[in-house]
Image (tube, rainbow, N blue to C red):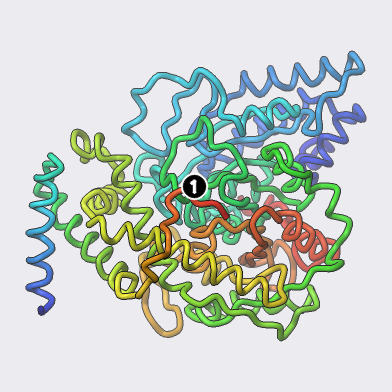
């Protein structure tokens, strides 16, 4: 492996940008290496739905020009990145994993989030695979094929931002963008063994993205380090920067592990992962409860089906047969759901927010919960056994993420390794949940865990 | 209501609601839609039974 391809696989976005700024590599060399790695390895992984090599090389040339002139090339100088297929990319049609949108004209400008990373020096390499219209947890897309998990190609990458997570885990890109309505950042981050941030609802502009569920849609980054998550989030948001806070560690922060709903219906490795994180954060034995979590999940399910179904009603009237079968029936059913279900779900949201406030005011700044009930399932697997019950995989991978995004709380998903050796065996993620607007608290905890070697996201180079 | 009656009940609702919305369901899609709405109803059931205070506002535009 050359120095450059080794660097691409080993360095995070921050490290890569530093190497480019220090002229160790040119941005063009880095982007060419990324495009070459994608050409070589993506056929087996299927992370990308479109590549933008000309754009990436033009972005790199801009960075190299800035460096040559002694100008500031930005914090992401020459860093290859990608975005889930629902973010507008100038010159590409945004298809959101669908066939139906293929006939639409290309986007005339980048989504706000893509533009923010681009303006910071990032080099955009392409659009990434997803469940159709973001309605799923597995990225087994009927039109574009499944994305394979770089940790084990027979397994799913998780979804719906599966391509975004797998590209980072495989070391094809150090940084990608995804969306999370019910867990679509946290589930694939957990199954692929990388870091993911689902910020506070409303904190990142969704301008220029194809919507799914207005009440619940969030955007956020995937990365292999906590500092990259913080850097990317700071570029996407307008609040106080989180990156400078990471060195403060857990000082003044207290974590508690969610019991009840979050301690049931999980495989032992998921619960053990939470315990390891709790121990490392010095909060072993400290518990918190979030009453009503099961109904919160139900309400999120109802809001998702209803708003999603309504959004798609015009297409469902004319072109229902062109939808992915995994998506179509749920959208059609959601479009017909009685209004009383939806209204109750929206009112329950206000109720559940109060339950969460109480859980936090009882002495915890951070709440810990599994990200997924199990590690990655196999592609095509229909059911899994949790607590002795056989349950559908597709509906239940988001069991623990749905109640949290339902009330918009910020979450960092951190990767753990049940094998005890980072990069070996299948990873599983833990949610570090903070209060609204306090992404920095969750990021600080994640950074402390990363420094202690408790969580890490090594690149899956061998098997991918 | 037994499971069979419930399924008939939901199938009839699906047909009526689809007609009301001007949605023509292809015959091959109808069983999947009935099954999905049945599941949605099962999920919504306990939620609807939960007594919320009358004074509680909805949160359609959510401000955490």
Which of the 4 image quadrants contains residue A125? top right
Q: Nearer the viewer, residue A189 or B45?
A: B45
Image coordinates for residue A385, horizontal then vertical, percent: 42, 78
Q: Which residue is drawn at 53% across and 39% down?
A: A84
For label 1, the SS is loop
Instruction: Name which residue lies at 84% across and 68% down.
Output: A252
Q: Is residue A52 above or below residue A176?
A: above
Horizontally, residue B43 falls left or right of residue A258, namely left
Residue A195 lies, with reference to residue A257, above or below; the image says: above
Horizontal relation, residue A414 to residue A107: left or right: right
Q: Which residue is drawn at 49% across and 47% down?
A: A217
Q: Is residue A69 above or below residue A310?
A: above
Return the x and y of residue A311 as percentages of the image width and height: 32, 40
Q: In which quarter of the image is the N terminus of chain A?
A: top right
| Residue indicated by mark 1 | A217
Give percent across and percent down for residue A80.
70, 33
């Amino acid at each position: 492996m050359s120095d450059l391809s080794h660097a691409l696989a080993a360095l995070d976005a921050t490290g890569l940008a530093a190497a480019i700024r220090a002229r160790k590599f040119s941005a063009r060399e880095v982007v060419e290496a990324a495009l070459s790695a994608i050409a070589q390895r993506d056929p087996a992984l299927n992370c990308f739905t479109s590549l933008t090599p000309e754009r990436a090389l033009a972005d790199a040339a801009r960075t190299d020009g800035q460096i040559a002139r002694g100008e500031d090339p930005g914090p992401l100088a020459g860093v290859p990145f990608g975005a889930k297929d629902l973010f507008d990319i100038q010159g590409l049609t945004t298809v959101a994993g669908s066939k139906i949108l293929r006939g639409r004209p290309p986007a005339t400008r980048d989504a706000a989030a893509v533009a923010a990373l681009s303006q910071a020096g990032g080099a955009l390499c392409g659009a990434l695979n997803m469940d159709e219209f973001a309605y799923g947890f597995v990225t087994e897309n009927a039109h574009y094929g499944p994305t394979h998990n770089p940790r084990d190609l027979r397994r799913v990458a998780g979804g719906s931002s599966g391509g975004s997570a797998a590209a980072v885990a495989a070391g094809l890109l150090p940084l990608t963008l995804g969306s999370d309505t019910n867990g679509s950042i946290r589930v694939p981050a957990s199954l692929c063994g990388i870091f993911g941030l689902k910020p506070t609802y409303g904190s990142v502009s969704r301008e220029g993205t194809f919507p799914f569920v207005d009440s619940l849609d969030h955007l956020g980054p995937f990365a292999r380090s906590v500092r990259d998550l913080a850097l990317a989030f700071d570029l996407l948001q307008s609040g106080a920067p989180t990156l400078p806070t990471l060195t403060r560690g857990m000082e003044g922060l207290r974590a508690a592990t969610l019991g009840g709903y979050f301690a049931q219906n999980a495989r032992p490795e998921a619960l053990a992962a939470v315990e390891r994180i709790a121990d490392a954060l010095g909060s072993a034995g400290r518990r918190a409860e979030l009453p009503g979590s099961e109904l919160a999940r139900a309400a999120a399910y109802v809001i998702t089906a209803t708003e999603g179904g309504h959004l798609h009603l015009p297409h469902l009237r004319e072109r229902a047969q062109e939808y992915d079968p995994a998506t179509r029936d749920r959208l059609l059913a959601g479009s017909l759901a009685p209004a009383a279900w939806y209204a109750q779900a929206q009112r329950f949201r206000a109720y559940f927010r109060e339950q969460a406030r109480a859980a936090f005011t009882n002495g915890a700044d951070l709440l810990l919960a599994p990200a997924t009930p199990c590690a990655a399932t196999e592609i095509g697997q229909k059911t899994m056994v949790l607590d002795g019950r056989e349950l559908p995989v597709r509906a239940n991978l988001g069991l623990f993420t749905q109640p949290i995004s339902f009330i918009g709380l910020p979450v960092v998903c951190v990767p753990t390794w049940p094998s005890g050796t980072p990069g070996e065996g299948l990873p599983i993620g833990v949610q570090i949940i903070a209060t609204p607007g306090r992404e920095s608290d969750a990021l600080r905890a994640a950074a402390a865990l990363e420094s202690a070697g408790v969580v890490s996201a090594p690149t899956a180079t061998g098997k991918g | 209501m037994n499971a069979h009656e419930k399924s008939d009940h939901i199938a009839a609702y699906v047909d009526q609601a689809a007609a009301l919305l001007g949605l023509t369901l292809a015959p091959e899609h109808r069983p999947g839609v009935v099954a999905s709405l049945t599941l949605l109803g099962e999920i919504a059931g306990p939620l609807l039974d939960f007594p919320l205070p009358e004074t509680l506002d909805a949160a359609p535009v959510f401000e955490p």
